[in-house]
Structure formats: C-alpha cells, structure tokens
Image (spheres, rainbow, N blue to C red):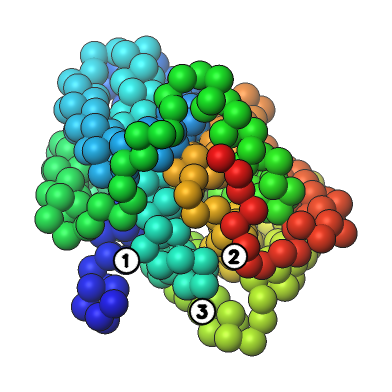
C-alpha cells in the first residue's frame, strides 16, 4: 500500500468515526439557548444527549450483522442517509420531546459510520498495524472536540442553535461523498451469513466467548465511560458552576482535547518498545490515580477552575493511551466476523458510556461532583476488570483468529 493511499484511507475512516463526536460536541455550547428556545430546562436538553447515546448503543448491534452479510459499504450508505435526513429534521424541532426522539434517530444513522470504520480498519490494515491506525484515527477523531464546541459556540452566538444542525448536515453530506469515491469495499458480501435472529445471536455469543475480547471490551468500556461523564457534565461544570461564557467554554473544551489527540500519538512510538497489554495496564493505573485524587480533592472543596482543567487534562492523557490499545486488543482475534465484533465493541463502549452520561444528568446538583464521581467509579471499575482478567492465557494471546462462525 502506497503512503498516499494509506493516508487517504486513514483520513476517510477518521472522518467517519468523527461524525458521532461532532454530533455530540458541536451543540453542547447551545444547551442554554436550546432550553430557552424550546421552553424547557437545561436538564431536559441533556436528555437529548443521553437519547443520542442510547441510539448509538442500540444501533451498534443492528449494523454489525448487516456489515458481515452485505459487505461494509451498503449498510454504511444506509446509515449515512438516515443520519442526513434526521439531522435535517432536528434543525426544525419545535419542542424538546421531538428533539430527544430525533437525536435518537440521528444516532441510529451515525453509528453505522463508527461500526463500519472500526471493522474496515481490521479488514484493510490487519492485526499488526491496527493499533497504530487506531491511534491515527484519534488524531482525526480528536479534532472534533477541538473544533466542534469552539465552532458551535460561535455559531450559536452569531446565528442560533438550529444552524449547528445545518452545519452537521453539510458535514454528513461531504463525508458521504468522500466515502463513495475514496474508500474501497474492504469485505465481500457473505451470503452464508444469516440475518435470522437465532444465527445472529449465536454469532454474537461466539464473539463473547472469546475471553480476551470480553476482558478488553469491558476494560475499554469502563475506561471510556469517564469521557462520556466529562462530555455530559462539562456544560454544567464550566458554564454553570464556573460561569464561563459559551466561547470560553469552547476553547477550554478544545484545549482539553489536545491531551486526547496529540499525546495519544506517542502511542505509536511506545508500541515499538512495549506491547499493547503493557501500555493499557500502565495507562489505566495512571487514570485511576488521577481520578481518585480528583475525587478526593473535589470532595474536600480544594479544586477550583484551574485544578479542574488540570486533572481533566491528565485523565484524558491516560485515556488517550488506553483507548487505542484496548481497541486493538479487542479486535485482534477476529477477521471473518469483524463487523459483529466491532458492533459489540461499540455496544459495550457506548452502553456503559450512556449509563455514565445518564448518571451525571440524574445526580446533577450544579457542581462538578457528579461528573468527578462517575469518572472515578468508571476508572476504578476498568482497573478491577483488567486485574481480574489478566490471569487468563486467552487474554494474553496476541495472534490467531480465535473466533468461530
């Protein structure tokens, strides 16, 4: 594969994975304006974020079998079309309940992009290079939290929150065009792959029986849940509790994203000397230490705005190392049913993340404590799961395709 083609594939795959984060992050600065415009509260607007997480979690399981049955691109096109239509209708929502439902539908479309992208990385680059490619995807993926809230803050201030969805609509169309012309079909349709409920269930169970997958998918899901808690809680913490304006909030969000993108690119250098298992272990340990210090100091009312940003920066730094390696370890055992494995990966990741998001919303009290507490609980949970699963030989395997049909 030439360098130019390698770059093109990574770029388009990264843009596909960025559709979801853009749809999440860009409208965050508009929460107060949406609440005022639709005659509701900010807490109710937060439920539109939670419904998005629910939709993208459920959608993972729908697209996995379709990607293995029809190839990667046809289900991907269907999902992108649904996303574009739902985004157009979101722009015209008249009440909060309609927006909550439309965000769920929008998520069902966008999750096709994420599931397909993860499976295509495994198809195109194989087991050996997938961890490096996942790190590169973070570079593109991470640009969304850098650009989206900042751009969203300016858009909401200048033109109103509905224009945010117009921008998302345009982004969705552009990414669809790039996918059509620059991304190859990486997996031939498998007519032997049944779409009947029982065979689909058996195939999901065959993936879950691979202990290595089960351990690392739960590790990644709990580690990543802290990011969902941060995204859900940050508008309340920074704009409500610390009284930052929309634009400043966008810049703080962008600054914190640097930890998740730029520093995660050091992962490629670390992989030259260390195995993914080693990096995950050290990264999770650092994440737990930071989360517990953050929680203890917050409980004692020690941390102001500066320390809050500092601890979130450290947390996202360690997550930037844990995420790509845990993802690669999850997907490594699978080739023929990578779509199903990718779907389960997304389901667990987003399912646990949704619970974290809902917890932050339910226990919201106008302070940073709900967000910080969920980050601490999820980080400790990830470390406990990793420690419990490390003794298994299957968890330590690094090569062969362990999956069955």
Which residue lies at the image location 59% right of the left edge and 82% below the top edge? 270
Q: Position of residue 325 (x, y in %)?
A: 59, 65
Neighbour class for label 3 at 10 Å: few (<14), some, many (≥20)?
some
Which residue lies at the image location 58% right of the left edge and 86% below the top edge? 272
Q: Element at badge 2?
A: helix
Mark 2 or mark 1, which is nearer the start of the sequence?
1
Query: Would you say 347 lies left or right of 15 here?
Result: right
Q: Position of residue 357 (x, y in %)?
A: 57, 34
Q: Quadrant of residue 309?
A: bottom right
Q: Position of residue 391 (x, y in %)?
A: 87, 59
Q: Nearer the viewer, residue 241 or 394?
A: 394
How far, Cα to Cα, is label 1 from label 3? Answer: 15 Å
Neighbour class for label 2 at 10 Å: few (<14), some, many (≥20)?
many
The residue under label 1 is 10
Mark 3 or mark 2, which is nearer the start of the sequence?
3
The residue under label 2 is 325
Q: Quadrant of residue 88?
A: top left
Q: Nearer the viewer, residue 398 or 402?
A: 402
Neighbour class for label 1 at 10 Å: few (<14), some, many (≥20)?
many
Which residue lies at the image location 38% right of the left edge and 24% below the top edge? 104
Q: Quadrant of residue 80?
A: top left
How far, Cα to Cα, is label 1 from label 2? Answer: 17 Å
Q: Are marks 2 and 3 in contact (CB under 8 Å)?
A: no
Q: Element at badge 1?
A: helix
The residue under label 3 is 268
Q: Quadrant of the C terminus?
A: top right
Up the image or down, 175 lies above or below 3; here it is above
């Amino acid at each position: 594969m030439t360098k130019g083609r390698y770059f093109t594939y990574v770029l388009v795959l990264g843009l596909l994975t960025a559709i979801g984060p853009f749809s999440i992050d860009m409208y965050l600065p508009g929460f107060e304006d949406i609440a005022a415009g639709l005659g509701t509260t900010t807490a109710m607007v937060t439920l539109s974020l939670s419904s998005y997480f629910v939709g993208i979690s459920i959608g993972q399981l729908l697209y996995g079998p379709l990607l293995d049955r029809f190839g990667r691109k046809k289900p991907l096109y269907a999902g992108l079309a649904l996303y574009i239509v739902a985004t157009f209708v979101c722009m015209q929502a008249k009440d909060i309940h309609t927006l909550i439902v439309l965000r769920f539908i929008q998520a069902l479309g966008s999750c096709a992009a994420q599931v397909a992208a993860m499976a295509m990385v495994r198809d195109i680059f194989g087991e050996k290079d997938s961890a490096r490619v996942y790190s590169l995807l973070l570079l593109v993926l991470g640009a969304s939290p850098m650009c989206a809230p900042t751009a969203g803050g300016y858009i909401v201030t200048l033109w109103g929150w509905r224009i945010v969805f117009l921008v998302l609509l345009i982004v969705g169309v552009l990414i669809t065009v790039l996918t059509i012309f620059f991304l190859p079909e990486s997996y031939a349709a498998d007519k032997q792959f049944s779409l009947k409920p029982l065979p689909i269930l058996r195939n999901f169970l065959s993936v879950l029986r691979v202990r290595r997958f089960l351990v690392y998918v739960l590790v990644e899901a709990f580690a990543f849940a802290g990011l969902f808690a941060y995204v859900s809680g940050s508008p309340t913490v920074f704009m409500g509790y610390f009284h930052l304006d929309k634009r400043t909030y966008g810049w703080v969000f962008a600054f914190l994203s640097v930890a998740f993108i730029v520093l995660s690119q050091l992962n490629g250098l670390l992989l030259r000397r260390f195995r993914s298992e080693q990096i995950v272990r050290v990264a999770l340990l650092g994440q737990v230490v930071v989360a517990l210090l953050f929680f203890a100091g917050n409980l004692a009312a020690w941390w102001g705005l500066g320390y809050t940003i500092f601890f979130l920066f450290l947390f996202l730094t360690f997550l930037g190392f844990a995420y790509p390696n845990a993802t690669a370890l999850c997907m490594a055992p699978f080739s023929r049913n990578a779509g199903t494995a990718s779907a389960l990966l997304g389901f667990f990741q987003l399912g646990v993340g949704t619970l974290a998001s809902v917890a932050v919303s339910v226990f919201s009290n106008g302070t940073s404590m709900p967000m910080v507490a969920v980050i601490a609980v999820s980080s400790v949970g990830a470390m406990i799961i990793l420690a419990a699963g490390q003794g298994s030989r299957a968890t330590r395997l690094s090569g062969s395709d362990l999956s069955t049909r």
